[in-house]
Image: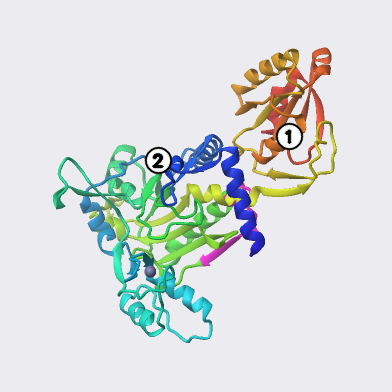
Amino acid sequence: MENNEKKMEKIISLAKQRGFVFSGSEIYGGLQNAWDFGPLGAEMKMNIKTEWWNRFVRGRSDMVGIDTALIMNNKVWQASGHLENFTDPLVECKECHHRFRADHLLEDYFEKNPDVIHEDATNNVSKMAEDLKSFDVKCPDCEGELMKPQQFNMMLKTHLGATEDKASEAYLRPETAQGMFVNFKNIIDSTRKRLPFGIAQIGKAFRNEITPGNYIFRTREFEQMEIEYFIPVPKTDAGWQGYFESWRKEMKEWISYLGIRQEEIYELEVSREELAHYSKRTIDFEYKFPFGQKELYGLAYRTDFDLKNHNLKYRDPKTEEEYIPHVIEPTFGVERTILAVMCSAYTEEDLPNQGEGEEDGAEKRIVMKFPKWLAPIKVAVLPLSKKEELSDEAKIIADDLRGSFATEYDETQSIGKRYRRQDEIGTPYCVTVDFDSLEDKKVTVRDRDTMKQERISISEIKQYLSERL
Ligand SMILES: [Zn+2]
């Protein structure tokens, strides 16, 4: 556990130092677990979203993309059940008035007291109230008495227009899914897609989490990549299970494409009691984060719940039969993807001191072993020293590469320190320009993972990198 805590601290500090993730509003003391993505984090986010879109939207004939509004008519949330059911059980301290998730307090209590016999109180507030009382659970902050737990809606509320009354109330969307459901008819009419087909969307969603935390894992504002895959009404369980399994396979392939090893993932079959109000079956893909095994992605069979509630139907063009399609929903969190990828890519290695320029006194190196497609910077161009003839040549090379790859030029500090820095941000290739380069028109290309160095003609670098990136 101690090692895991240290690993998390190291990743957070590297992410800040190198420009992946900063704490939000930092100069004003931050804002409860809000985070900003720096230059490298923004590049990575962009890589993930583009690759996902190419793979699941452009790469498939049975998918279309959409980009819908963050704020929707309240009737959407009424129909979807979010106004009524999207709640967490909250409990407030009588002394310090801090609020906590009642179910989390009980979980903690039972974890610390494994001998206590109890029934599961999942989603049952009155049972939680009973348990908190009978086990005499106190405020974790001040040991004060707790009030009775109550259901608290997690949608983030705002007001539209100049007046702040009930009529102007609106919500920031808690999921991107509803934007896809309410446009079902528009999509059918405009694209003439036939079942089965899916709608995908990438965008922000908001949840008024009471206890955000674990770095960028749980935040109030986050980005989702979601798919609603519409299928004909299944006559038997096999009718939806086939689609479910095929999406499960797609998700696993995406996870391994991210460089995440299979043994780092646990597929959790969500129990009947814990299923969301719309789901008949859900699998959580859990990642073994340093702070515990937690949900990375989800795959849910939403049945016809949403389209039925929105009163939307599909007419089969061949049979003229009219019915409500069922839905398989794969959901991917962008920030969680970045966090899992960083945890998975983070590597500490002994430095064997091979290759020119590696010997800078350091005995270890930290390497972010991102898959090459995901690395925020693909190639760094480094003149051996700041001498003008070297930096002039190196700048020309960097400018030439910049059009094809995310390229960084760096001439500050010793070459060894600059290699260390590129390792830490996961740059797959470093191109070093030295005095020989001016004579033989060749440069040294260093591989991030093997640290092997090769002399390559300047005229051939682009080709060399294209073949490898
Ligand atoms: Zn308290």
Q: Amino acid at mark 1?
A: Lys
Decide if residue 129 is on the left or right side of residue 261. left
**Count of numbered marks:** 2
Q: Compared to 382, does 240 lie above or below?
A: below
Q: Position of residue 253 (x, y in %)?
A: 58, 51
Left or right relative to 240: residue 162: left
Q: Is residue 355 above or below residue 120?
A: above
The picture quadrant for ligand 1 comes to bottom left
Task: Please tell me whether residue 418 belongs to the stretch shown in magenta.
Answer: no
Name the residue rendered at 39%, 45% in the picture: 204
Residue 388 drawn at (x, y percent): 72, 13
Element on which disc 2 rests: strand
Residue 442 in view (yes/no): yes
Residue drawn where x is 66% and y is 49% of the image: 346
Q: Is residue 90 above or below residue 18?
A: below
Nearest to the observer: residue 279 or residue 419: 419
Indicate the quadrant where residue 381 lies. Answer: top right
Q: Residue at x 30, y 55 (%)?
A: 155
Q: Which residue is mark 1?
A: 417
The spot of residue 186 in percent (x, y) is 28, 42
**Bounds of the magenta span?**
255-268
Residues at marks 1 and 2, CA–CA distance in whole angstroms: 44 Å
Marks 1 and 2 in Cβ contact (< 8 Å):
no
Find disc 2 in the rendering and name its residue. 65
**Label 2 Cα crowd, 10 Å radius (few <14 / some 14-19 / many 20+):** some
Residue 16 at x, y = what percent? 56, 42
If the image is split into quadrants, where does the N terminus sit? bottom right
Instruction: Depth check: give the residue in front, 310 or 3.
Output: 3
The crowding category of the residue bearing disc 1, from other C-alpha atoms within 10 Å (few below 14, some 14 to 19, many at least 20), is: some
Q: Could you tell me the amino acid type at mark 2?
A: Gly
The residue lying at 84 percent from left, 31 percent from top is 356
